[in-house]
Image (cartoon, helix red, strand yellow):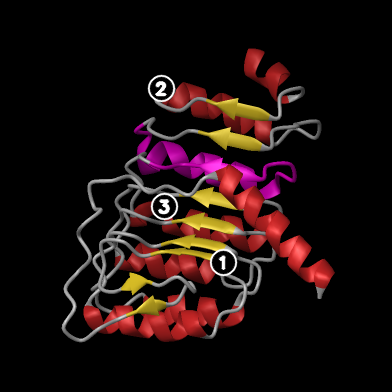
């Protein structure tokens, strides 16, 4: 009851590093489907919710039109929930930022999620770092390359520490070179490095860049807003 009242007034709900469990998610699900819900930012990072509890939330958000930022990092999410995330981004055209940092996704889940966001017209920031979507069979890279080729809305993508092979990294590099919307790209912990122009450079004798694996390089919303301002100024000058 309290949460439903809060959702009618609050634009930001931060429940990160808690243990809201099934009961908390049930209340959130009841709130986000309300016509007068005003929530724009929902941060559930580090709640260890798991797939079974989280699926209902992703399903409930399909009909929500207010949420712009969703953080589900560090929640033990796996390929089991990938279909629900795919469906969400095929139906919800309002979410602009998605954070799935440090979960348990592997190649099959990565394929489905990139299929889901392929033609999404609203998503501008996607943090998929610290999962394990690389080096699987079949490879997730064709979906990533197709996304980089087709989608022109995303401006910030983090694929750090995902166990991509050298060949996969080369293919992603080629796909990124043909993308003209992404201004911020992160690939730490995989093969190659991002140069000053934002290109992913792969050298044949280069090993994985593990220098900063212990450092948490996270996409920052303030940086995202700064990028939006720069893009706007650039377009106005043109």
Q: Secondary structure at mark 3?
A: helix
Residue 194: % across, % down = 39, 70
Please say if 118 is above or below 17: below
Quarter occupied by the N terminus: top right
Q: Which residue is mark 1?
A: 183
The residue that appears at 53% across and 76% down in the rendered structure is 147
Q: CA distance from mark 1 to mark 3?
A: 29 Å
Q: CA distance from mark 1 to mark 2?
A: 33 Å
Marks 1, 3: nearer the viewer: 1
Q: Which residue is mark 2?
A: 18
Q: Are marks 1 and 3 in contact (CB under 8 Å)?
A: no
Q: Are marks 3 and 2 in contact (CB under 8 Å)?
A: no
Query: Within 10 Å of the Cα at label 2, are there few (<14), some (14-19), or many (20+) other Cα atoms?
Result: few
Magenta extent: 48-73
Is residue 2 covered in magenta?
A: no
Q: Is residue 59 visible?
A: no
Q: Is residue 17 left or right of residue 63?
A: left
Q: Of callouts 3 and 2, which one flags the residue occurring earlier in the amino acid sequence? A: 2
Q: Nearer the viewer, residue 9 or 220?
A: 220
Residue 168: % across, % down = 30, 80
Q: Secondary structure at mark 2?
A: loop
Q: Which residue is mark 3?
A: 81
Residue 110: % across, % down = 39, 65
Is residue 53 covered in magenta?
A: yes
Q: Is residue 140 left or right of residue 3?
A: left
Q: Of callouts 1 and 3, which one flags the residue occurring earlier in the amino acid sequence? A: 3
Residue 95: % across, % down = 65, 51
The residue that appears at 48% across and 49% down in the rendered structure is 219
Marks 1, 2: nearer the viewer: 1
Q: Is residue 225 visible?
A: yes
Please say if 135 is above or below 39: below
Quadrant of the rendered image containing residue 166: bottom left
């Amino acid at each position: 009851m309290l949460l439903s009242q809060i959702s009618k007034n609050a634009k930001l709900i931060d429940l990160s590093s808690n243990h809201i469990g099934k009961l908390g998610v049930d209340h959130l699900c009841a709130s986000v489907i309300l016509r007068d819900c005003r929530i724009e930012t929902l941060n559930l990072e580090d709640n260890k919710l798991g797939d079974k509890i989280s699926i209902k939330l992703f399903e409930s958000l399909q009909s929500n039109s207010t949420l712009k930022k969703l953080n589900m990092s560090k929640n033990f999410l796996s390929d089991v929930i990938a279909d629900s995330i795919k469906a969400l981004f095929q139906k919800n055209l309002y979410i602009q930022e998605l954070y799935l940092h440090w979960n348990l996704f592997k190649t099959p889940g990565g394929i489905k999620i990139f299929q889901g966001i392929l033609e999404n017209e609203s998503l501008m920031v996607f943090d998929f770092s610290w999962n394990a979507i690389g080096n699987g069979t079949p490879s997730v890279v064709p979906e990533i390359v197709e996304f980089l080729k087709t989608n022109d809305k995303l401006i910030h993508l983090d694929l750090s520490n995902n166990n991509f092979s050298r060949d996969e990294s080369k293919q992603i590099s080629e796909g990124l070179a043909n993308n003209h919307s992404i201004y911020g790209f992160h690939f730490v912990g995989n093969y190659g490095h991002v140069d000053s122009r934002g290109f992913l450079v792969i050298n044949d004798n280069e090993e994985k860049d593990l220098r900063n694996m212990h450092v948490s390089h996270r996409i920052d919303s303030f940086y995202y807003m700064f990028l939006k301002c720069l893009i706007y100024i650039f377009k106005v000058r043109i």
